[in-house]
């Protein structure tokens, strides 16, 4: 009897020591934070990634070491049979949860405020891996190149997603049954330059809260735009769906007399106007909203009509008659004509070219140096001819080389040079061929003439 009591007491001692060691190791990180960091409350509110990584490592170190102590003491003081039982329990507690986590249910810890208030930073959550088909309103865990992301599903394949001035729209309807905080930010699809995105086949659209963007928040708040495609995910990358905790959070409707679609009014900075759209949250805008979206152009740009006659931000130096033109190629500058509109004028040419007027006498073009005459650019001469510039008559092409059996001679006008058959030249002038039955003769005084054959 005494031996049994002794074994029971040693078993309790082993459990006490093992559990104590495990808890001390697991709590050591928080002890370090409390002792080494003066403002530890702020640290917990914005914990870095390494804190969560070390928290997981110390959990497993404490778990394994604690059980090792329990099994060792029981083996030495109680017996090998009881030690084997506890070893089997240890294996079950280690590998059975791993089996469950691999195929059925898993848990993780929220390392950011990307889905607050549905999940808070530092909070454990559980998710199931059996049914991975996303539905609107569900919270899913997705595997991405940036790591695992927790997201709230708002759109499925075929849906049109828009983010206008802080309000999400799904197929034209404002999203009002979930909480999100995209303060007056609009979403743009950079691939199409439109303020909407269509969810393609095999994808879904899930949103985090604005806190998800971390270091990029300042830039997004500055430009008031965010890329819509970053919240587009493939269905096959879903790891699981949240099962705990599930918080049903419905935004409270503002019912005051100055309500805007159930939202309270906002104060606008100087120079901005207050807008209450037909659907969604109120917003402030300096310019007139374009298709319901407030576009605030960066410094040096303003609103103008694009090629598709839609309003857009455009560099001020590329606007002419309120129309936005494309940037000019290198070596050209943009000019604005009140009548003709915007155009690009050449200001710099290649080393072997100079500025000259085209054949219309108005348009400036780059022209090869050897083909400019009296400020006008002419076409290149055919092979065997050279370009000549006469101050009076202008430019022309002069023959410099003739085929075999011909040589250069003047035409009958005595001015134009041309290639002529050797037997048709007389006194340096080229004559027409004689009619059949006649032969060409060259008289030094009278010139070339045709004589009938006797």
Image (cartoon, rainbow, N blue to C red):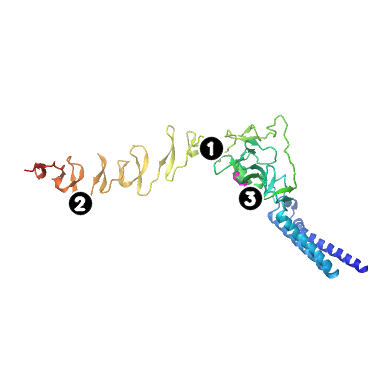
Instruction: Tell me the number on the disc at residue 98.
Output: none
The residue range painted magenta reads: 227-236
Quadrant that contains the C terminus: top left
Q: Residue at x 71, y 55 (%)?
A: 103
* Res 289 → quadrant: top right
For label 1, count other residues whose C-alpha is less than 10 Å away and answer few (under 14), some (14-19) or many (20+). Answer: some
Residue that label 2 marks: 404
Q: Which of 339/230 is in front?
A: 230
Q: Using residue 14 as the reference point, say whether residue 402 is left or right of it.
A: left
Give 109 or 78, whichever is nearer the viewer. 78
Outermost left residue? 454
Expressed as whole percent of the image width and height from the top left, the position of residue 360 reads 34, 37
Q: Residue most toward the right?
A: 1
Residue 33 drawn above or below residue 152: below
Q: Residue under circle 3? A: 236
> In the image shown, does 27 or 107 lie closer to the viewer?
107
* Image quadrant assignment for residue 185: top right
Please name whichever residue, 431 or 347, is drawn nearer the observer in this view of the structure: 431
Measured in 3D between alpha carbons, the distance from the residue under mark 3 to the one under mark 1, in whole angstroms, is: 37 Å
Image side of residue 72 versus residue 135, left or right: right
Residue 62 within the magenta-colored segment of the rendering: no
Residue 170 image point, x, y percent: 63, 38
**Dot 1 corresponds to which residue?**
312
């Amino acid at each position: 009897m005494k031996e049994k009591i002794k074994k029971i007491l040693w078993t309790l001692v082993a459990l006490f020591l093992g559990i104590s060691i495990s808890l001390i190791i697991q709590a050591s990180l928080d002890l370090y934070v409390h002792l080494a960091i003066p403002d530890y409350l702020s640290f917990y509110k914005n914990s870095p990634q390494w804190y969560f990584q070390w928290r997981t490592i110390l959990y497993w170190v404490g778990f394994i070491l604690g059980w090792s102590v329990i099994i060792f003491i029981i083996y030495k003081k109680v017996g090998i049979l009881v030690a084997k039982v506890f070893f089997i329990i240890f294996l079950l507690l280690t590998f059975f949860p791993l089996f469950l986590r691999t195929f059925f249910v898993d848990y993780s810890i929220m390392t950011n405020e990307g889905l607050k208030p549905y999940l808070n930073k530092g909070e454990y959550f559980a998710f199931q891996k059996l049914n991975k088909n996303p539905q609107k309103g569900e919270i899913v865990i997705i595997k991405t190149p940036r790591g695992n992301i927790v997201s709230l599903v708002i759109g499925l394949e075929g849906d049109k997603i828009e983010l206008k001035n802080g309000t999400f729209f799904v197929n034209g309807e404002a999203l009002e049954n979930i909480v999100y905080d995209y303060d007056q930010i609009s979403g743009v699809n950079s691939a199409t330059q439109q303020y909407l995105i269509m969810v393609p086949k095999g994808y879904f659209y899930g949103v985090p809260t604005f806190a998800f963007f971390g270091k990029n928040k300042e830039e997004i708040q500055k430009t008031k735009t965010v890329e819509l495609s970053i919240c587009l995910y493939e269905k096959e990358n879903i790891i699981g769906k949240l099962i705990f905790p599930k918080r049903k959070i419905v935004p409270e409707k503002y019912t005051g007399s100055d309500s805007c679609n159930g939202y309270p009014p906002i104060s606008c900075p100087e120079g901005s106007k207050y807008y209450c759209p037909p659907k969604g949250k109120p917003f402030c805008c300096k310019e007139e909203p374009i298709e319901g979206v407030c576009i605030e152009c960066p410094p040096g740009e303003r609103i103008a009509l694009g090629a598709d006659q839609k309003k857009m931000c455009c560099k001020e130096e590329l606007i002419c008659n309120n129309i936005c033109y494309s940037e000019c190629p290198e070596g050209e500058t943009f000019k604005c004509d009140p009548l003709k509109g915007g155009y690009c004028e050449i200001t710099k040419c290649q080393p072997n070219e100079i500025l000259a007027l085209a054949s219309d006498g108005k348009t400036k073009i780059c022209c090869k140096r050897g083909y400019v005459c009296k400020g006008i650019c002419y076409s290149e001469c055919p092979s065997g001819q050279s370009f000549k510039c006469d101050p009076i008559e202008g430019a022309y092409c002069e023959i410099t080389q003739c085929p075999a059996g011909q040589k250069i001679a003047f035409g009958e006008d005595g001015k134009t040079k041309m290639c002529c058959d050797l037997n048709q030249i007389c006194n340096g002038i080229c004559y027409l061929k004689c009619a059949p039955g006649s032969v060409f003769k060259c008289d030094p005084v009278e010139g070339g003439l045709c004589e009938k054959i006797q």
